[in-house]
Amino acid sequence: MKTENMNRAYLDRILDGSQTDFYYHFGISSNEALLERLRGVRAIVIAGSGERIRDLARHWSILNHGADILEFPKEERFVTRYTSGILFASHGMGMPSASIAVQELMRMLYFLKNGDSESMDQVFWVRVGTSGGVGLPGGSVVVSTAGLMSDLRPYRLLRGGDGEYWFNGTFPALTCREIIAAGAENGQEVIPGKTVAGNDFFLEQFRLDGAICFETPEARAEWLKQLYNNGVRNIEMEGAMLAGYLNHWGFSSFAMICSTLLDRLQDDQVRSTPEELQVFSEKAETVLFNYLQSSLLEQRPFRTVSGDDKDVRMPGPASPDWERLRRAAVGALDSSYSPYSHYPVGAAGFTLDGRLVRGANVENASYGLTLCAECSMISHLCSTGGGRLAAVYCVNVQGKVLVPCGRCRQLLLEHGGPDMMIMTPQGVRTMADILPQPFTTENIKNY
Ligand code: R2B
Ligand code: URA
């Protein structure tokens, strides 16, 4: 990360508590308790429309076993949802609107990750959207290699003390390749290409169907040909700024995945039916979710194939990295508070969306109030975005595997369900194995 490019003079005052940051367009501030639940954020997904954000979050929650969806209190400007490690936010249309969303989200991320470069850099950013294809039919999916302005130059701000500010619009090539590979694994063609961001849907996209039109059919055709010959494969309205700002802070993984609504070489008007448009949009969304499942959240221990009616296929390792989990549980021993028993216990778990959560036992002078390591781990889970536990490992001070006590089995079942895997001295078992005939919410419903 390029810490020298961060406005630390302002941002660090938020961290030391001397100032509150108001993310005004999101209707939330840095001292609201809700933000504490976003500290475990792993990805920020932005899209133009609020409805899209609601859909995306619902879909991601379903894929994560109905994880809670948090909402920001205000949605007059931007709609925001948080579920299972992903912050979803709308950005409106065009670079002026999207730049507000992106800057406030960058500030929010700085706050959430305590200004720690490494933690910030682990967060993946992506815009999923729509675009006009250049030589591609409606329904194609393009992953952007670079974001350019309509004169094929990088994004620039025209006013400022020093005149023009230029931003590098390149999208990270590795992320781009990974998205294409995740698509291929799922039988989806994802086309790499440069993307032009027009400041106006009509004038800066050389349309002839605007209320105002400066171009002739010849100039339009010449512009589109120049785009095509320069490797541009789609046109939208935010990508050059998005890549520019994220590069300015030096994020290493971000992307833009857009479906095309029409081929601009053929037409200016978007004539598709609402049903066709829905199908087009969902194609980009599916590419995104497949990528999130397969590579961003690579620690995800399960192959989960069921979703809602969209049934997203999810590649990924079929079993958790138990050794990594064991090491995390051993690491957690350091935070044990066990002055009475002198028996430190550490626990670590992978969530279905690939986060790692940990805990250690915390004893009490009254003995009976002692919290087991699993309790602390579940608090960690709930305070960093919630979601479902997929695999758990508990250890004693020698690093030897321990089975959870009866009460903790009940707690683990609530947050992992009967399929959650747990390491035991007899090997890997499921919760159903170690807590048969459990008492669950079903019993309360059926009362
Ligand atoms: C794609 O579609 C929107 C315009 O219709 C704009 O936000 C974009 O980039
Ligand atoms: N969005 C754009 O910005 N342009 C198009 O042509 C289609 C969608």
Image (tube, helix red, strand yellow):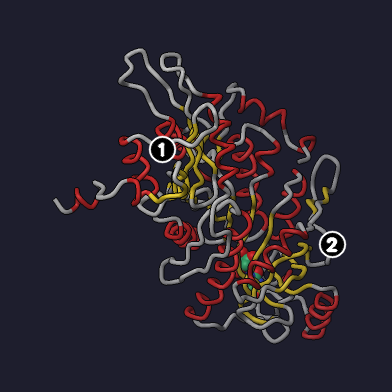
Bin the neighbour count of mark 1 within 10 Å (Cα to Cα): few under 14, some 14-19, many 20 and up: some
Q: Is mark 2 within 8 Å of ligand 2?
A: no
Q: Work out whether residue 158 can be spotted.
A: yes
Q: Is residue 111 above or below residue 151?
A: above
Which residue is under mark 1? 403
Q: Is disc 2 surrounded by few (<14), some (14 to 19) or many (20+) residues within 10 Å? A: some
Q: Tell me if 373 is positioned left or right of 195 in this view.
A: left
Judge whether 212 appears above or below 297 on screen.
below
**Which mark is on residue 47?**
none
- In the rendered image, residue 219, in percent from the top left (x then y), is placed at 82, 81
Determine the secondary structure under disc 1.
loop
**Residue 309 in picture, x, y percent from top left:** 41, 71
Ligand 1 located in image quadrant: bottom right
In this figure, what is the number of numbered marks?
A: 2
Between 214 and 170, the one lying in front of the other is: 170
Task: Describe residue 66's horizontal placement relative to residue 334 as left or right.
Answer: left
Visible residue check, residue 211: no
Residue position for label 2: 153
Q: Point out the frontmost of discs 1 and 2.
A: 1
Labelled pair 1, 2 in contact (Cβ < 8 Å)? no
Residue type of the residue flagged with mark 2: Arg
How far apart are the two marked residues, 1 and 2, measured between alpha carbons? 60 Å
Q: Which residue is found at the position 73% from the left and 78% from the top?
A: 134
Q: To which quarter of the image does residue 241 belong?
A: bottom right
* Amino acid residing under circle 1: Val
